[in-house]
Image (spheres, rainbow, N blue to C red):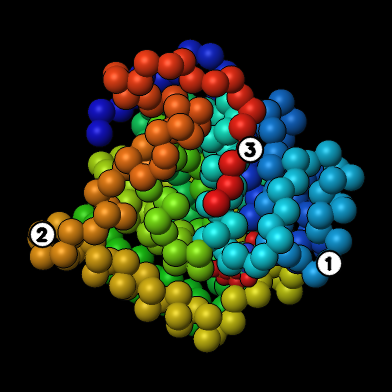
Amino acid sequence: MDRAPAPTQTPHVVVVMPAYNAAKTIERTYADIPAGVVSQIILVDDVSQDATVEIAQRLGIDVVVHVQNRGYGGNQKTCYLRALGTAADIVVMLHPDYQYDSRLIPELIRPIREGRADLVLGSRFLDNGTLAGGMPLYKFVSNRLLTLTENFVLRQNLSECHTGFRAYSRRLLETLPFILNSDDFVFDSQIIVQTVAFGFAIAEIAVPTRYFKEASSVNFRRSVVYGLATLNALGEYILDRSNLRPSPRLRKTLPQIISRYHRKKLLRLTSPNDDEPASPYPLSLEL
Ligand SMILES: Nc1nc2c(ncn2[C@@H]2O[C@H](COP(=O)(O)OP(=O)(O)OP(=O)(O)O)[C@@H](O)[C@H]2O)c(=O)[nH]1
Ligand SMILES: [Mg+2]
């Protein structure tokens, strides 16, 4: 895809936090978000069994509450729909478990601001502190192997495809049909595959690795399921590109799969045939 010209004005940056039992860490995560860079913070709670919602509300964060547990990917779908319902130019996904250093948000969004990329990944593998930061050895090895496979299949040169600290341009979120993705953790891998399939550029910045008890709930079994599901997402890409099994997830755009009525309200990328003007923000949509 052609690079968008570098925006001259300060972009409207919205941080979304997919939350699940984040009461012990949300305050620290919030405190580190740099003032003056972020216009709005949205937390989507996926039926936490602790005080996540109350604490987030007290901090002044915009909170969306799921009444049913939807999973990590389902949570992100609500995050991005909500973000698109605001005036966001750039959307940052930040885990509320204090695993990623939110002070790096200005660095994370820079490649998008400069028109160099539409997806930026905060990589824990660009410096040498990954194991020292506490990443379990089995996660380190499987992350490396999966990332190598993803680079090979997707023809990329990324150091880590499995980070939870990411920035997206609005036009990327308005294009990828992310609501067709999994509700589980593999959502993150599917977004990368879609980003490549739709021809957007990916950039990386280095972020420190930070593991501690509250920051990590994914155990060995869930990691294996995630790894296999990621390989499946790559298989889907290969079959689609070779025309053996076309995949709507890799071909249909978001405007093609949401209703015309909502499309006009939610998306800035309106089609030339759309006659009515887009509605003003804010809009509160979820699946
Ligand atoms: N919606 C939802 N979110 C979850 C669930 N389990 C974990 N999360 C969220 O998903 C994110 C990632 O999960 P973590 O447990 O932190 O994963 P991790 O072990 O740190 O993963 P790695 O960094 O890859 O090692 C966090 O923001 C959690 O709040 C769940 O069942 N539902
Ligand atoms: Mg974590």
**Crowd tier of the residue under label 3, counting other residues whose Cα lies within 10 Å: few below 14, some 14–19, many 20 or above:** some
Residue at 56% of width from left, 29% of height from top?
88
Alpha carbon distance from label 3 to label 1 = 25 Å
On screen, 60 above or below 68? above
Disc 2 target residue? 243
Give residue 228's position: percent from left, percent from top.
Answer: 37, 78
Name which residue type carries label 1: Asp
Name which residue type carries label 3: Ser
- What's the mark number on residue 284? 3
Residue at 69% of width from left, 42% of height from top?
42
Mark 3 falls on what kind of element?
loop
- Mark 2 C-beta closer than 8 Å to ligand 1: no
Name which residue type carries label 2: Asn
Alpha carbon distance from label 2 to label 3 = 37 Å
Mark 2 falls on what kind of element?
loop
Residue at 41% of width from left, 20% of height from top?
6
Q: Is residue 221 left or right of residue 53?
A: left
Disc 1 target residue? 50
Of badges 2 and 3, nearer the viewer stands: 3
Q: Is residue 128 visible?
A: no
* Image mark count: 3
Residue 202 sits in quarter: top left
Which residue is at the front of the view, 123 or 169? 169
Rendered-image quadrant of the N terminus: top left
On screen, 108 above or below 277? below
On screen, 249 above or below 224? above
Give residue 78's position: percent from left, percent from top.
Answer: 58, 50
Mark 1 falls on what kind of element?
loop
**Crowd tier of the residue under label 1, counting other residues whose Cα lies within 10 Å: few below 14, some 14–19, many 20 or above:** few
